[in-house]
Image (spheres, rainbow, N blue to C red):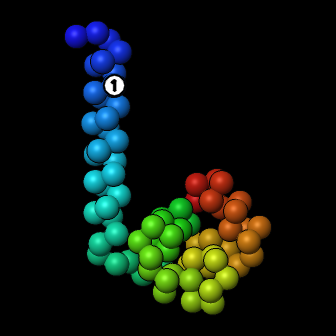
Amino acid sequence: MSLVIRLLIVFVALAIVQTTAHAQSCTPKKTCTQMKSCKEATYFLKVCGHKARDRDRDGIPCEKLCGKTMKQYKERLAAGK
């Protein structure tokens, strides 16, 4: 089997595993105090649809983690915090 085909198989397998992991990570529902990062809070809000993570509906989930302003939110997301 050629190297290109082997790499393609590995890539597809990794994509499947990653998709499965994301699908399972929406449960159980977590509260903001249980989350470790703004990135995780954003995932629960945007991917899982947990609207309670954004109580004031300003687009920023879990403000203690992500900041109170959109500027703080974007900075923390970019930093992976």
Q: Is residue 36 visible?
A: no
**Could you tell me which residue is drawn at 22 percent across and 10 percent down?**
1
Q: Position of residue 26 (x, y in %)?
A: 34, 69
Answer above or below: position of 2 versus 8: above
**Could you tell me which residue is drawn at 33 percent across and 25 percent down?**
8
Left or right for 14, reference 36: left
Q: Quadrant of residue 34?
A: bottom left
Where the C terminus falls, by quadrant? bottom right
Q: Position of residue 78 (x, y in %)?
A: 65, 54
Answer above or below: position of 25 versus 5: below
Callout 1 secondary element: helix
Q: Position of residue 27 (x, y in %)?
A: 29, 72
For badge 1, the amino acid type reads: Leu
Q: Residues within 10 Å of mark 1 (few under 14, many from 20)?
A: few
Q: Position of residue 5 (x, y in %)?
A: 30, 18
Q: Quadrant of residue 35?
A: bottom left
The residue that disc 1 covers is: 8
Q: Is residue 49 visible?
A: yes
**Could you tell me which residue is drawn at 70 percent across and 79 percent down?**
68
Using the image as rendered, state which of residue 72 and residue 10 is in the foreground. Answer: 10
Toward the bottom, the furthest residue is 56
Left or right for 11, reference 81: left
Using the image as rendered, state which of residue 25 and residue 64 is in the foreground. Answer: 25
Q: Quadrant of residue 72?
A: bottom right
